[in-house]
């Protein structure tokens, strides 16, 4: 269908730059005590709470309200059926997620509808999210647009050349992530790891994407072969999963199985759908950003920020992280300082529990946030310096190449009769940076799996990305204090992930009164450590047991655990004891 | 020694649940513990008991009773350590 793409090459998708593939979304959150049940035509409260305006809005023919995270509130609360005997759906967020709804209505009515719905006593929050977009188009402050490449490359020869020598991001640090070294390690190509990319379109029929491709597993992909969305997703796939061959490119983690979840549905729904198909240690990539408080409107991505700032997307990411999935999220191309206090102020209609997740204090999504750094060519400033468009701030965990990424799609490196042989040498943005971090993490998880080790938890992945890698550099206009983090270096990252240890010790000692039961706690233990506890009396008293003990565990944060040791004295005299631990490893 | 996570699960507030995992070689010395996955600061979130069944001459089944001590739903993972 060569004519198909040629006819569309200058069609509406290119004629409306900035007119991204996303659309505005009205999100409603039910009040906790209302116990709402909403069908496409009716709303009711199981607790008998007054519905107010919600009743008439739900009955309106122009408006459809449906649960955001599943087909019904009951199914969300129950969780999906277990897919194995020993694995049960994550349910901790279910009561919260069951209160989220998507409100479908004509776009011009969304703002007024949100304001009306907030008057309902059964509604905790109602807000309109700006249209999301690919993290690709730079604001007007950038001289040239990102990822607006045309199929200007030479036509493909009968056999596509090997472009891997141009994939500098595969090379040794500091220029690249040293994928070449990772590939020498068992599992180092990402074997046994699953990755799902969330965005709008992909070309899974590309000649360089034939191995370990899972296709679109949720939602419906953009069907236009050469749309901005399709090229974008294809480029992301190539960076992570390009085939191992002498043709074209090779992905950073080509043995990982990569699939896609399409934002043809509300973004939070697509994220949850992806999470439901992954397990602990797998990786979920968010190739999306949207206009925040500083977005002026119109044809620009100035002010676009990471999507975790919105309560529903935050909740969906949190759902994935709570399942042990490493979520990698583009920081966005909005020129923004994510530490700016403006992000502490909720958008109109946000729920009371919302706090700025970029602070990572009261709310922390648990995602790995990725900024865009300059490649080593020097064409865009010193290597690893922040690119002008890249958002930055304390919450940005790591960086990847934000320019000059050679991968599949677009056609400026090689074009030809079908988009399935097109390649680019200019993929850019936090969009090109994030897959580099995903690929590196997939290599690490593959090595851990190959050695029978526990995969990195989301919190551990963040920690190691921050502790290793090639450091961010200053540029004349953008000092490294404008944080985008380090570029991953697999030659550091994999050994750091493989480090483990085992030791024993006495954490504390004390005395339990006669026939009493008392509890002690010890905190700030890394939660990924496997720790066992025992208690031994130090007051000799032969002839009968003196102490009984039980360990309880508190997950204080994504990263830390607190151990509570409850000790019962079984005798009629005080007993001194010591509480012993063994760290078994991680 | 090898460590790992055998299974994950979830429990509603205050709920107890039972799980088992079977066909563990009898000659393996295995210890178990449970780690919540859902942050909930300020109090213990989970406790557990382990019981053991000798399924046949070669295999062992481990049974778990896991209790959510908090007032909110909780995810957890059951971790093992093979000590020999």
Image (cartoon, rainbow, N blue to C red):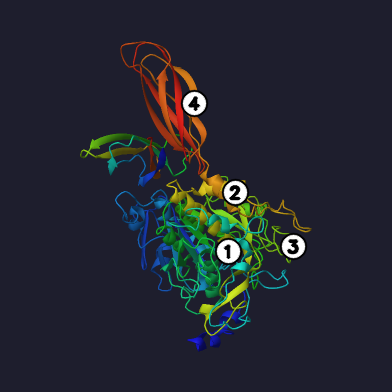
In the displayed structure, A327 sits above or below A565; it is below
Q: CA distance from mark 1 to mark 2?
A: 30 Å
**Chain at tag 1:** A
Label 1 neighbour load within 10 Å: few <14, some 14-19, many 20+: many
Q: CA distance from mark 2 to mark 4?
A: 29 Å
Label 4 neighbour load within 10 Å: few <14, some 14-19, many 20+: few
Q: Position of residue A346 (x, y in %)?
A: 59, 55
Q: Are marks 1 and 4 in contact (CB under 8 Å)?
A: no
Q: Specify whether A570 is left or right of A196.
A: left
First reached walking from the N terminus: tag 1 or tag 2: 1
Residue pointed to by mark 4: A505
Residue pointed to by mark 3: A381
Q: Secondary structure at mark 3?
A: loop
First reached walking from the N terminus: tag 3 or tag 1: 1
Q: Residue at x 70, y 53 (%)?
A: A482
Residue pointed to by mark 1: A289
User: Residue A492, which numbered label?
Assistant: 2
Q: Are marks 3 and 2 in contact (CB under 8 Å)?
A: no
Kindly report which numbered mark, 1 or 4, lies closer to the viewer in this rendering: 4
């Amino acid at each position: 269908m060569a004519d198909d793409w040629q006819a569309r090459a200058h069609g509406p998708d290119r004629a409306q730059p900035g007119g991204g593939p996303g659309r505005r979304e009205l999100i409603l959150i039910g009040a906790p005590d209302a116990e709402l049940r909403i069908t496409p035509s009716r709303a009711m409260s199981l607790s008998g709470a007054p519905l107010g305006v919600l009743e008439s809005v739900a009955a309106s023919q122009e408006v459809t309200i449906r649960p955001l995270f599943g087909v019904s509130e009951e199914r969300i609360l129950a969780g999906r059926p277990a897919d194995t005997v020993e694995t049960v759906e994550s349910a901790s967020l279910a009561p919260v997620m069951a209160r989220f709804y998507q409100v479908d209505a004509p776009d011009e009515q969304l703002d007024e509808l949100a304001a009306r719905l907030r008057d309902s006593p059964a509604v905790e929050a109602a807000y309109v999210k700006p249209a999301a977009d690919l993290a690709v188009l730079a604001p007007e402050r950038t001289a040239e647009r990102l990822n607006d490449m045309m199929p200007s490359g030479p036509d493909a020869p009968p056999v596509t050349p090997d472009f891997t020598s141009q994939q500098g991001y595969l090379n040794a640090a500091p220029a690249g992530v040293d994928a070449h070294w990772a590939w020498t390690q068992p599992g180092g190509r990402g074997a046994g790891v699953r990755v799902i990319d969330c965005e709008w379109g992909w070309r899974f029929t590309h000649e360089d994407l034939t191995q370990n491709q899972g296709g679109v597993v949720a939602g419906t992909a953009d069907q236009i072969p050469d749309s901005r969305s399709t090229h974008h997703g294809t480029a992301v796939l190539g960076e992570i999963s390009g085939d191992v061959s002498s043709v074209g490119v090779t992905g950073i983690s080509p043995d990982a199985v990569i699939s896609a979840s399409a934002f043809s549905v509300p973004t939070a729904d697509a994220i949850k759908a992806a999470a439901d198909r992954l397990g602990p240690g797998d990786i979920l990539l968010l190739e999306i950003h949207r206009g925040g408080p500083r977005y002026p409107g119109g044809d620009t991505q100035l002010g676009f920020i990471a999507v975790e700032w919105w309560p529903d997307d935050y909740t969906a990411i949190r759902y994935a992280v709570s399942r042990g999935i490493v979520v990698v999220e583009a920081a966005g191309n909005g020129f923004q300082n994510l530490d700016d206090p403006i992000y502490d102020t909720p958008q109109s209609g946000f729920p009371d529990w919302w706090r700025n997740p970029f602070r990572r204090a009261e709310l922390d999504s648990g995602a790995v946030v990725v900024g865009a750094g300059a490649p080593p060519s020097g064409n865009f400033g010193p290597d690893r310096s922040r690119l002008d468009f890249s958002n930055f701030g304390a919450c940005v965990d790591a960086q990847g190449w934000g320019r000059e990424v050679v991968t599949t799609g677009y056609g400026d490196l090689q074009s030809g009769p079908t988009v399935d042989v097109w390649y680019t040498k200019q993929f850019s943005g936090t969009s090109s940076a994030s897959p580099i971090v995903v690929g590196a993490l997939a290599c690490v998880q593959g090595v851990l799996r190959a050695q029978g080790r526990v995969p990195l938890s989301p919190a551990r992945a963040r920690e190691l990305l921050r502790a290793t890698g090639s450091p961010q550099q200053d540029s004349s206009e953008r000092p490294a204090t404008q944080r985008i983090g380090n570029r991953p270096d697999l030659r550091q990252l994999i050994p750091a992930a493989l480090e483990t240890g085992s030791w024993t010790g006495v954490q504390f000692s004390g005395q339990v009164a006669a026939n009493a039961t008392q509890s002690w706690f010890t905190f700030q233990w890394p939660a990924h450590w496997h720790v066992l506890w025992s208690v031994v009396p130090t007051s000799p008293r032969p002839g009968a047991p003196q102490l009984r003990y039980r360990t309880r565990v508190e997950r204080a944060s994504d990263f830390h655990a607190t151990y509570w040791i409850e000790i019962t004295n079984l005798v009629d005299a005080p007993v001194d004891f010591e509480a012993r631990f063994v760290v078994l490893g991680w | 020694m090898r460590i790992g996570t055998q299974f994950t699960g979830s429990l509603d507030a205050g709920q107890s649940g039972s799980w088992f995992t079977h066909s563990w070689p009898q000659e393996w010395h295995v210890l178990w513990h449970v780690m919540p996955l859902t942050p909930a600061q300020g109090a213990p979130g989970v406790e557990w008991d382990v019981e053991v069944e000798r399924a046949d001459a070669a295999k062992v089944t481990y049974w778990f009773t896991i209790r959510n001590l908090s007032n909110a739903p909780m995810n957890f993972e059951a971790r093992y350590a093979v000590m020999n």
